[in-house]
Amino acid sequence: MNSNYWKLLGITSIAILCLAIPIYLSRDVSTQNPLLIQGTEMSEVQISVSVDDAHLSQIEQISQQLQSSGMNVEQTLSTIGIVSGSIQPDKLNSLSQIEGVKNVEPQQSYQLAPPSSDLQ
């Protein structure tokens, strides 16, 4: 098989992962994992919270409210209106109720193959 085949296969695999990861991250894990139902400790999910334009000047107060709601704030990017951090999945829904919060999304990370790999 030639190298174009492997490149196409790699690109197709990455495209499938890009579609599958958000679906996987948005599932309701509490109904799928019996350990979580029994009350064992859940792992936190990494999230990004975007603040609407009308509340950008109040992003520090919103960040404090997010912390009060259970979010571990790791970074506040006031110029672009993003607060990033982590939270227990069962507390996730309460964040969107905070005034000024536009959107709450799971953070996504991707690992590219090294430059020396055949996929490059």
Image: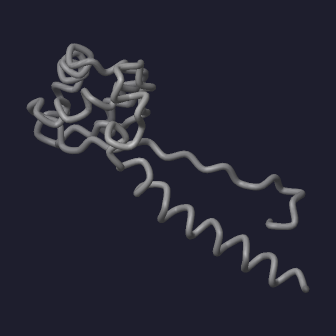
Image quadrant for the C terminus? bottom right
Image quadrant for the N terminus? bottom right
Residue 93, image x and y in percent?
20, 35
Q: Nearer the viewer, residue 40 or 64?
A: 40
The image quadrant of residue 43 is top left
Residue 14, image x and y in percent?
62, 65
Residue 81, image x and y in percent?
28, 37
Residue at image position (56%, 69%) is 16
In this rendering, the count of numbered labels is 0
Left or right, 5 with respect to 75, comes to: right
Residue at image position (82%, 84%) is 4
**Taking 88 as reference, is 55 above or below it?**
below
Q: Nearer the viewer, residue 1 or 47?
A: 1
The image quadrant of residue 84 is top left
**Taking 68 as reference, is 22 above or below it?**
below
The image quadrant of residue 80 is top left
Residue at image position (29%, 36%) is 49
